[in-house]
Amino acid sequence: MLRRILSIAANTFRETIRNKILYAILAFALFVIGMTFFLADLSVGDFARIIADVGLASIHVFGVIMAVFLGINLVSNEVDRKTIYIILSKPVRRFEFIFGKTLGLSVTLLLTTLAMATVLFLVHLSYRYGGRAEVGIFIASAGIYMELVLLTCLASLFSTFTTPVLSAIFTLSLFLVGHLTKYLYVLGEQSKGTAVRWGSRFLFYLLPNLENFNWKNEVAYGGLKSFSILGWAAGYLVAYAACVLCLSCLLFARKDFK
Amino acid sequence: MKDRARILAIEGLTKSYPTGFWRKPVRVLSDLSFEVRENEIVGFLGPNGAGKTTTIKILNNLAFPDAGKVTLFGGHVRDGADVRRRIGFMPEQPYFYEYLTGGEFLRLCGQLCGMSRANTESRSSELLARVGLSGARGTAIRKYSKGMMQRLGLAQALLHDPELVILDEPMSGLDPMGRMEVRGIIRDLKAAGKTVFFSSHILSDVEALCDRVIMLHKGRKVAEGRVEELIGAETLYVELVISPVLPPARLAAAGIPADAGQAQGDLLVLRAPDNGQANRWMASLLREGCTVLSCVPVKKDLEEIFMERVGGSGATGTAS
């Protein structure tokens, strides 16, 4: 089973790294991150802070574009191109296919995030006014990466039953909502209606809380030095991603290919 | 044939697909039943929309039946990896990962089938040579022609040496040479003890290859049987070719109606309604001093049987 999942993952990784659009997005992301070197001169006070701030925001935005763009086509492309007919006619279970595809894309996103984080680290290090080796860039990037993996799982869930356009809309909606769930909870708790309170609590736990992976501000203000905070976020990612992937597998298990 | 092991059995298979905004179900297969036994070559015939591809998808777990039972190697079709390892499948107009080369794609298939790297490499070389793609092993699939894709599809279906080979329109997109090669491969599979189940529009290929045929129309089975039983059951007419061409008066004197013959150059082609009449005509013609060059009983071919069973106008596909 593991060998089949890894074979599908390796093939998905090969597919994504041969995708020219991915390189175009990555090149543009690296260019923007590189430009923060000059942008820092325009800021007031801690010059290097703007590098980390804008750089991490760039990693986040371009990472989400990559995750959504590649994730929504993860399964639907295989169905549209009918390549799935050959794969699923082999001794491959459908959940192995979903796991392998998601794993392959996660590896691609790991490499692209690492490339962006490394460039940002070097830009930050080489800045002439207060530049330093900011390890927090890698910690915050690890958080962004975990968020991207979760978005990939959500995109692959949607791509099992709907079109790429709708998958993109659903995934981006959850991305936006995922950064606002704590406000949903706070607003719900202030309500006098029990149903509203319970409803907001339910949605708070049901929807992904992507703020669990957000440490950009801590890095920008120099308050993030330890990798230990990754543990809780990784636990949340594993639990949530497992639920999403199980749902994907359940939906995909009964899918008819016309 | 009945004493051979039952490889594939379908009983009462029914399938509908939801269509349109209201997802109104449209029946694609209705109470379809048949079986395929070990070492048979079985042709699955029908026009476009008859339900052939849907049946084949159900056999490959790509679609699920509404009702009915599908058994492969004695187990349920969804029994999992063990059953799938014994089946090779080539879909209609196969598509592959265009960013891979032919060799890389077969390596991926070998990994998915649990084959060792060495075995995959040796089988790939053997099969690529067999389907005429040795020179294209390192070429990206995006550069393959339609015929090359079809050949690669055949190679991947046979890579893990399956016992049952299911081919959906294997001749589609191939030139006459390619069709001949595929026919050769199918015959070789039978000689190697494999079972082959394939769908096709090209009735002449089916007639030349198959032990048995199953004809499908609008999701229902309209005929099933051994090819020689289907085409050999009834003689349409007996064709006599004689020389020289006799004038109508001499034909009438020999007891042959004038409209039974047609001159073709120096030859006269006669159509006798049955063997008895043909014998009587031959005796008369010999008395008239003619030479009988040939006497051939003409039987129905699969195309005629097919058109007869589907009611002619009902067939929407080509039956060539």
Image (cartoon, coloured by chain):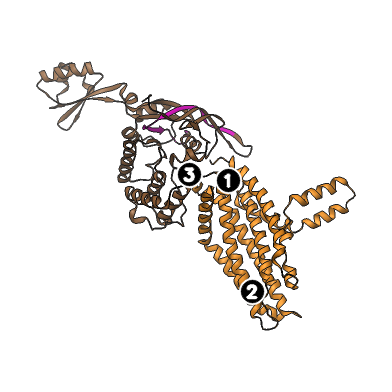
**Which chain's residue wears label 2?**
A
Question: Which range is magenta?
Answer: B25-50
Q: Colour of chain A?
A: orange
Would you name the residue on which mark 2 appears?
A: A121
- Which residue of the protein is positioned furthest toward the bottom in this rendering? A128
x, y (%) of residue A230? Answer: 70, 62
Would you name the residue on which mark 3 appears?
A: A90
Would you name the residue on which mark 1 appears?
A: A95
What amino acid is labelled 1 in the image? Phe
Q: Quadrant of residue A37?
A: bottom right
Asked whether, in this view, residue A33 is left or right of residue B100, the answer is right
Vertical placement of residue A71 versus A56, above or below: above
Q: Residue at x 30, y 42 (%)?
A: B180
Q: Marks 1 and 2, Cα distance to the nearest angstrom?
A: 38 Å
Asked whether, in this view, residue A161 is left or right of residue A92, the answer is right
Query: Which lettered chain is shown in brown?
Result: B
Which mark sits nearer the N-terminus, 1 or 2? 1
What amino acid is labelled 2 in the image? Phe
Residue B241 visible in the shown view = no
